[in-house]
Amino acid sequence: MDSLTQIVLGAAVGEAVLGKKVGNKAMLFGAIAGTIPDLDVLTRFLTNDAITAIEWHRGFSHSIVFSIIFAPIFGWLTYKILPKKEATWKEWSWLMFWGLFTHPILDSFTTWGTQLFWPFETRLAFQNIFVIDPLYTLPFLFFLILAINQKRTSSKRRIYNTWGLIISTAYMAITLVLKGVAYQNFTTSLADQQIAYKDIDTRPSPFNTILWTANIETADAYLIANYSFFDSKSITFESYPKNYEALGLLAENDKVKRLIAICEGWYTISVNKGSLYFNDLRFGLISMDPKEKQFAFSYQLKQENGTLEIIENQRVGADAKKLLSELWKRVWGN
């Protein structure tokens, strides 16, 4: 999830663990703990390999192992830094653990997911919420602000914080139900249109859980479709050829195999002006145009002197304002 959401969750968890004892400091250090796992973005400066940087993101720092190892370290540092010893280092460690641990738990509901069980490579991604969802974050933030303005001994403080946790968790549960309903509508439409498929993957569109997108694998292509709960027309499916044969001998290249593993097999290969591109289907296209061909995450496969270089495409042509406008219109039905 986005940084603000992780800060809010971390602060609320910190308050729940130690707020009554240390007041707003629990929220502050809970927010810090909730931010720490995302510092893995800095590791991209340690490598020139784009694939390695992708593999590291939401890896070790988003695992149970990381939470267990570093919670007592950060707890001890917090205990030493604060001059007033209102809580023991064990209590600070407990706060740090829950701040660190709830971060990857929340991220596991997004499309990218987390390697919660690192060093195992399995990436947990339920894909039921977009990385930024105002309906999850804003009510949560509202109750946190109410809580922070109460005295540490006030019963209202714990009540407000608890309501924030309950409402945000309830909304997350609802998104799982909505995902199930969307999935049912996609599969029903595929059956009605007599489309044979191997696999289907669904996710919400940006900033909402009303409009959903599905990737459908067929024998030689992937179909992409959108469905809004306000739709009145049948679901239409746009086809994108897999084009795997364009890889040639590169199909056996280690870097290409790693890219395939990262996107869990959801990819196509395209050729543009003589250049070969690897398209990650999990994050969709750069616009809502059903004829759009450019994907949000695409990598040029450039071979020089027998060495394959992976270059992330800079999403040329993406217009954020236009995309938001198209998205808003599509949310309200076809």
Image (tube, grey):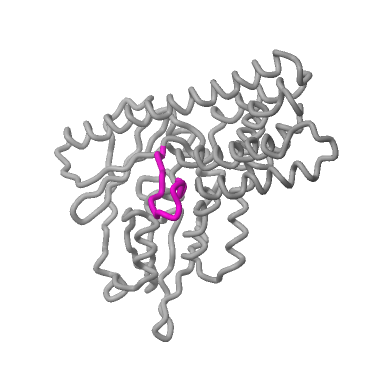
* Residue 66 in picture, x, y percent from top left: 55, 50
User: How many labels, in total?
Assistant: 0
Residue 208, percent from left and from top? 48, 32
In percent of the image, x 48 and y 68: which residue is there? 311
Residue at point 43% right, 28% down? 175
In this view of the protein, which residue sits in the foreground, 210 or 234?
210
Q: Viewer-proximal residue, 328 or 176?
A: 176
Which stretch did the figure color magenta?
112-127
Q: Nearer the viewer, residue 157 or 231?
A: 157
Query: Is residue 212 magenta-colored?
Result: no
* Image quadrant assignment for residue 13: top right
Q: Specify the farthest residue to the top.
A: 155
Report the side of 89 relative to 137 (left or right): right
- Magenta stretch prevailing secondary structure: loop
Q: Residue at x 59, y 30 (%)?
A: 137
Residue 326 visible in rendering:
no
Residue 125 part of the magenta segment: yes
Which residue is pictured at 17% across the width and 33% down the height? 192
Residue 142: percent from left, percent from top = 66, 23
Q: Quadrant of the C terminus?
A: top left
Residue furthest out toward the right: 83
Say which quadrant the N terminus sits in.
top right
- Residue 233: image quadrant is top left
Residue 26 % position (x, y): 72, 32
**Residue 83 vertical position relative to residue 305 in the rendered view, above or below:** above
